[in-house]
Amino acid sequence: MSGIDEIAKVDPEIAQVIRDELYRLRHKIELIASENFPSRAVLETAGTVLTNKYAEGYPGHRWYGGCEFVDVAEELAVARAKSLFEAEHANVQPHAGAQANTAVYFCALQPGDAILGMEKTAGGHLTHGTAANISGALYDAHFYSLNRETEMLDFGEIAEVARNCRPKLIIAGGSSYPRDIDFAAFRAVADEVGAMLMVDMAHFAGLVAGKVHTDPVPYAEFVTTTTHKTLRGPRGGMILCRERFAQSLDHAVFPGVQGGPLMHIIAAKAVALKEASQPEFAAYASQIVKNSRALAAALQERDLRLVSGGTDTHLLLVDLRPLGLTGDNVEEALDAVKITANKNNIPFDDKPPAITSGIRLGTPAVTTRGMREAEMVEIADLIALVVKNMGSQEVMRRVRERVEELLAGFPLYPDL
Ligand code: PLP
């Protein structure tokens, strides 16, 4: 009897939600750049009795008895994170990426201190100083943007903004920047203005693990990440830092911004980190980028404009303005042909976030499914057909058929 059947005995409605979601995942092309399909081992670990345990504190120093086994899980996760990323210290307790970032701010800053992050429409994240987020409410947030011509980071401009606002912390990394990042250049700016550097590698952590993206660890005091994007682990967060911040960072996570850690998720992070240290994972990371480049080239051959002219990572941003379209409409049209992606602001976008002038595409999930460059060309063809024939029921019907044919060759979680 499967786990879902067991759930159905108690709660048929939720069992149906799970079946429906599994069906959706199997029958749509997943191009959301921040999503992935973790292994069965990761999924199973996340659904175990380890969820029952209260373990406030850290291994060997808990506020509850009975932690001898969950301690082993957390020690393994920490050791594997340190070894994989060659970090001096790791904290694997953040429940998610937002909490990881908040904990770093709580550790490194006082309320009112100046911080400098990437503007959200340029690719930055909500937690890098946006007014609606605690990072913008508690700290004096400043932003750098991108070069208008190249749509890439411009260290001349970043240095100028930093000289003007004198931040205590500079934040590098984001959610929709398709290019590799020169962390040495960020370090130089931070050193010039006497700032600390935090790199949020949530999106590209798996590429760093697979050595196909510049490694931020040697350059930054703090490196934060999610564990569920390119790293292909359970939904969660993690922080790496220099040894001199180890104690204060741990204190900032618990009791600073969190209570009891999610031990089932920490154990699942340990499993994912073990997987990420294997040679197969490096091959996976490298294929993500090859696929992303192949998708980019095939879209460009079909006359779609990409922000910055391409990609070095797992994601790319299509500028829909030349087609006279908006992100919300294209997201909906793609969904109707079983392609899942998300609307996204592009640099210097004049459309609000609920509309946007762009669509963000990513290859981590389709690469996990086993797709390679040839399938990326097929996907680019399907996307181009949709955006050039908006509203044509006949084109939508043909594209849906081709999506089904394509997915049939790449089964997902066949034994779930
Ligand atoms: N940092 C970056 C760069 C992200 O892209 C995200 C999520 O999209 C986060 C932080 C927040 O992660 P979470 O959704 O796990 O809180």
Image: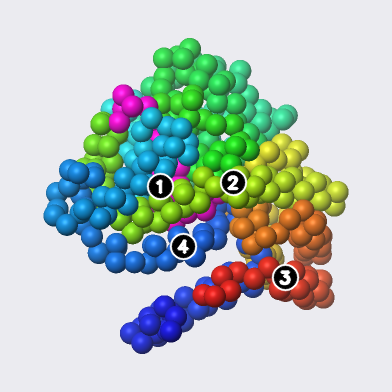
Instruction: Report the front residue among 81 and 256.
Output: 81
Task: State if disc 4 and disc 2 touch (CB < 8 Å).
Answer: no
CA separation, marks 2 and 4? Answer: 17 Å
Q: Which mark lies nearer to you, 2 or 4? A: 2
Q: Which residue is mark 3?
A: 409
Q: Which residue is mark 1?
A: 237
Q: What SS does tag 3 mark?
A: loop
Badge 2 or badge 4: first in the primary sequence = 4
Q: Start and end of the magenta stretch? A: 225-246
CA separation, marks 2 and 3? Answer: 25 Å
- Residue 414 locus on image (x, y percent): 58, 74
- The quadrant the N terminus occupies is bottom left
* Residue at horizontal 38 percent and vertical 81 percent from the top: 7
- Residue 76 locus on image (x, y percent): 35, 47
Q: Which mark lies nearer to you, 1 or 3? A: 3
Task: State if disc 4 and disc 1 touch (CB < 8 Å).
Answer: no
Q: Is mark 1 within 8 Å of ligand 1?
A: yes
Q: Which mark lies nearer to you, 2 or 3? A: 2
Figure check: 8 above or below 355: below
Q: What SS does tag 1 mark?
A: strand
Q: In this rendering, would 362 be left or right of 217?
A: right
Q: Amino acid at mark 4?
A: Ala
